[in-house]
Image (cartoon, rainbow, N blue to C red):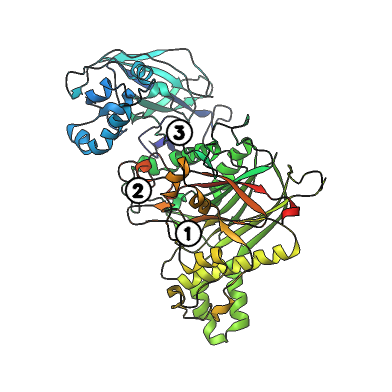
């Protein structure tokens, strides 16, 4: 007979808006062990699985710690209450938590001195009113208000299935997967799984149950504004879809989303395990990406299965068409082989796909060694150059035009390159060679057509490095220290390290701004290179690795997504975090194609 061997959750901390799908291990009648579902619509040997979710609602009000959202709050900051700061930000789980967070927490008090947050009363109603008889007061109890909403899941009649010891269980779902809602915040969820007789509809055998931790709200970072290079905040000027409503312009997003295979607790021990879990991160990343309303989206470190099963179908719902290029080798992960790559999406109402080029640096390495090296040296050279990195080049045709009456019906093409260059810091020659190889390919495309170009991605090269100099300056100083290590002669002669594309880094446009938001953004640039101070921020490294380059003879920058500062990243200034689900930050630029008469 069908039987359940084991039930567990990938993460025991549920977050609002993030699906919970338990892992259910079954033994089929023929003794085969499997995780395949057995629904009522397709019973197995006269049996199927029935699932139920319950919210365990206590008679006591529960508040969540603002610093450690998986912990129940025991203290509330009296200063926050007096200043009418949103009440959820005032909770702490212990005196030590309150003390450790004080340096950051006092910033809330300083800001509230000049502005009262109107959401305070609203949040107070959600979490309840508490005793505030001290600067960090202990919380008192009050009644709860149950609700049975679960997003798009079916709604069920409120049914009290059990009540004991001051707790009431309310049924909230009958599917295997449940998505917690705001009504679940602060409450424990219970999952039940049982084998049911298909004929009698009665349970057979033991009921398997899991209790989660208390549901926590999804952390939300402060929104990043889009800033005009003229110093005007343009976030208020949006069209009906939330995009910047400027005729003849388009926006491009570049973002290394941190592949799940690399998002380990060993590498990112400072990030809570629930915030590293893929079910949480994918929803958080999707919300962030969709929220930018970019016309073109260039993503790096996208796992092939995540592209097929999540990003492609989810972004399709938001009007995007996707193209993907996987790396040329897999990474072993547990009991599966995982591979990531570059994904480029574009809005189908703004662009159409014309052509796709795939760049495999391994193939370029093979071609170079075959033509340049004797057989005895090929193996050593290929071992150094074979790093499996790729680039995806897409030619698009715009469905809008700013060419004017002089060029009616003229096609507006755009070439977008998306790449992820090798990460190893001791292989600077390989980084330079990969960038040079990509640029030579783009030069060939440019020679065949009058076409604006964008070069986006994670180049794993800091500002001022030889690879960055090649991109931004079109050449590399022969005395540059990065050229010193070239054991296989891949960079010789150094005079070949040039290109003719008029590339400029989009974010250097902030350097020309000197007032308002522009001055603030200018302070977040490296004054030597005019690049952001960082686009990657972990405990071990902080610096810029990501760029959006454009051909300055055919495109102009209209606006840019604001850069983050350390305060924006909160307490530990390290990524990923519950608010930001990658160790990189997203870059976004809005461009306008120059009329051909000006080129």
Residues 442 and 175: in front is 442
* Mark 3 surroundings within 10 Å by alpha-carbon count, few (fewer than 14), some (14 through 19), many (20 or more): many
Closest to the camera, between mark 1 and mark 2, is 2
The residues tagged by marks 2 and 3 sit, at their Cα atoms, a distance apart of 23 Å
Identify the residue position indicated by label 3 in the image. 18
Residues 267 and 203: in front is 267
Residues 313 and 522: in front is 522
Picture quadrant where residue 369 is located? bottom right
**Horizontal side, residue 259 vs residue 309: left or right:** left
Q: Residue at the location (44% across, 17% down)?
A: 148
Closest to the camera, between mark 1 and mark 3, is 3
Residue 126 image position (x, y, % from top left)? 36, 18
Q: Residue at the location (60% across, 65% down)?
A: 438
* Mark 2 surroundings within 10 Å by alpha-carbon count, few (fewer than 14), some (14 through 19), many (20 or more): many
- Where residue 331 is drawn, which disc sits there? 1
The local secondary structure at tag 1 comes to strand
Label whose residue precedes the other's in the sequence (1 or 2): 1
**Image quarter hosting the C terminus:** bottom right
């Amino acid at each position: 007979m069908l039987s359940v061997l084991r039930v567990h959750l990938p993460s025991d901390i549920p977050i609002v808006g993030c699906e919970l799908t338990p892992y259910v291990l079954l033994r089929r009648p023929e003794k085969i062990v499997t995780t395949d579902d057995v629904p009522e619509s397709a019973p197995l040997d006269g049996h199927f699985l029935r699932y139920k979710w319950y919210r365990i609602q206590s008679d006591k009000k529960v508040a969540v710690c603002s610093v450690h959202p998986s912990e129940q709050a025991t203290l509330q900051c009296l200063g926050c209450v007096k200043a009418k700061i949103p009440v959820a930000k005032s909770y702490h789980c212990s005196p030590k938590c309150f003390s450790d967070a004080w340096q950051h927490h006092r910033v809330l008090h300083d800001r509230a001195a000049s502005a009262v947050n109107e959401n305070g009363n609203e949040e107070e109603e959600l979490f309840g009113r508490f005793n505030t008889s001290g600067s960090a007061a202990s919380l008192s109890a009050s009644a709860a208000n149950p609700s049975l909403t679960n997003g798009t899941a079916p709604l069920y009649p409120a049914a009290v299935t059990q009540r004991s010891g001051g707790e009431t269980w309310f049924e909230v779902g009958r599917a295997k997967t449940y998505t917690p809602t705001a009504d679940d915040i602060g409450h424990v969820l219970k999952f039940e799984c049982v084998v049911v007789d298909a004929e009698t509809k009665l349970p057979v055998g033991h009921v398997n149950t899991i209790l989660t931790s208390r549901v926590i709200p999804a952390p939300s970072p402060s929104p990043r504004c889009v800033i005009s290079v003229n110093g005007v905040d343009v976030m208020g000027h949006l069209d009906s879809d939330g995009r910047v409503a400027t005729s003849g312009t388009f926006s491009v997003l570049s973002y290394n989303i941190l592949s799940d295979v690399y998002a380990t607790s060993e590498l990112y021990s400072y990030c809570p395990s629930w915030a590293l879990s893929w079910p949480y991160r994918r929803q958080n990343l999707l919300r962030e990406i969709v929220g930018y309303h970019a016309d073109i989206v260039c993503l790096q470190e996208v796992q092939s299965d995540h592209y097929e099963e999540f990003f492609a179908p989810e972004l399709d719902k938001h009007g995007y068409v996707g193209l993907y290029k996987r790396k040329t080798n897999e990474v072993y992960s547990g009991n599966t082989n995982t591979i990531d790559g570059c994904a480029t999406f574009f809005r189908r109402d703004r662009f159409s796909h014309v052509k796709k080029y795939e760049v495999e640096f391994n193939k370029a390495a093979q071609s170079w060694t075959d033509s340049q090296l004797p057989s005895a040296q090929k193996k050593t050279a290929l071992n150094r150059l074979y790093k499996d990195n790729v680039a995806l080049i897409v030619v698009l045709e715009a469905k809008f035009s700013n060419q004017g009456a002089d060029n009616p019906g003229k096609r507006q093409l755009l070439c977008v390159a998306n790449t992820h260059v090798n990460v190893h810091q001791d292989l600077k020659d390989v980084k330079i060679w990969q960038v040079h190889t990509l640029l030579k390919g783009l030069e060939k495309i440019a020679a065949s057509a009058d076409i604006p170009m964008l070069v986006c991605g994670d180049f794993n090269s800091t500002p001022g490095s030889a690879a960055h100099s090649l991109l931004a300056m079109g050449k590399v100083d022969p005395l540059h220290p990065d050229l010193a290590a070239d054991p296989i002669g891949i960079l010789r002669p150094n005079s070949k390290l040039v290109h003719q594309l008029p590339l400029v880094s989009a974010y250097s446009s902030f350097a020309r701004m000197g007032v308002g938001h522009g001055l603030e953004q200018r302070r977040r640039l490296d004054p030597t290179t005019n690049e952001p101070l960082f686009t990657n921020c972990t405990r071990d490294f902080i610096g810029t690795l990501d760029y959006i380059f454009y051909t300055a003879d055919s495109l102009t920058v209209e606006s840019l997504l604001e850069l983050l500062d350390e305060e924006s990243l909160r307490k530990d200034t390290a990524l990923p975090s519950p608010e930001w689900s990658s160790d990189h930050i997203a870059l976004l630029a809005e461009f306008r194609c120059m009329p051909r008469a000006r080129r």
